[in-house]
Amino acid sequence: METLLEPWVLITLCAAFLQNIRSSLQKHLKGVMGTAGATFVRFGFGVPVAFALLAFLLYMQGKALPAMNATFAVWVVVAALAQIIAQALLIAVFSYRNFIVGSAYSRTEPVQAALFGLVFLGERASSAVLFAIAIAMAGVLMMSVAKSRATPLSLVTGLMSRGAGMGLLSGAIFGLAAVGYRGASLALEGPGYMIQAAVTLCVAITLQSVVVAAWIAWRSPQEFSAIARAWKLSALVGLVGAVASFGWFSAMTLQQASVVKTLAQVEILFTMATSWFIFRERVTMTEFAGVALVTVGILALLWFG
């Protein structure tokens, strides 16, 4: 049984918590800049944080920078671009009437990551682990529709809709990105999972910053002024986002991406707990059932993982 003392478990829990904070901070940015600007902030302001973290790790561990190779380059480029594309698809899902169903299906990332891990990295998951992932995903899907007019049945009936297809595609590409980051970090073959993760983060976040900045310069250059005006909050988003990404990459260097991403669903429990205990929002039976399934799935994953 995996215990809470396992490094990848602790790192994943911390990363999920930080991602929840980053998402909350980014919502405040939406009032002063567009989607592209808020996306750039996540990457661009995280670049100096990523390189500072890498320098700190190299100094503290007395290690040399690992040699990069073609396998690393391919995987990190694929993962970085896939993450941007998946995010764009997820945003596009919200333009459809059945966006609740589409966004719910985007959360199938762990299941699809398990498939990509098998195909590209040759990583097999046991039947028990796959069953645990399925239980957690069922809970996530239920919680995704709990406060809408959609129902668990609508997830099935709406499967053939365009919105659902976009959601599934988004989840698939997010899954590919997760497997890609693991593949890139493992390709460095040393000198340790933290430095490997930091190097992967530095290259990926730099590439993503350049791509998104180029897009803004082409489509909406006025966004740069909005970003400059909100530099304090932007810097905080970049800091939290970079540290969270470092956590994801570190965990996925130690453990299969599908397993990490399933445990990462604990983030939705953090969000739900906030709405219940702080904002005193009403809890539905569907939400209760979803929380129960996610919890059972995560516990089963830790037991059999």
Image (cartoon, helix red, strand yellow):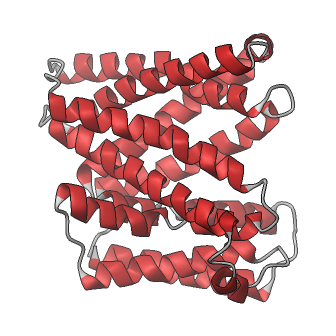
Q: Residue at x 67, y 65 (%)?
A: 162
Count up the numbered dots. 0
Give coordinates of residue 138: x percent, y percent.
55, 81
Q: Residue at x 33, y 29 (%)?
A: 198
Where is 146 relative to 270, above or below?
Answer: below
Give coordinates of residue 19: x percent, y percent.
58, 45
Nearer the observer, 135 or 80: 80
Q: Is residue 227 left or right of residue 181?
A: right
Q: Quadrant of residue 232?
A: top right
Q: Answer whether residue 246 is visible to the viewer in this image.
A: no
On-image quarter of the C terminus: bottom left
On-image quarter of the N terminus: bottom left
Q: Quadrant of residue 255?
A: bottom left
Q: Residue at x 78, y 30 (%)?
A: 34
Where is 241 relative to 129, above or below?
Answer: above
Q: Answer whether residue 85 is visible to the viewer in this image.
A: yes
Q: Is residue 180 left or right of residue 186?
A: right
Nearer the observer, 2 or 90: 90
Give coordinates of residue 139: x percent, y percent.
58, 79
Nearer the observer, 7 or 213: 213
Q: Residue at x 25, y 29 (%)?
A: 73
Give coordinates of residue 45: x percent, y percent.
58, 20
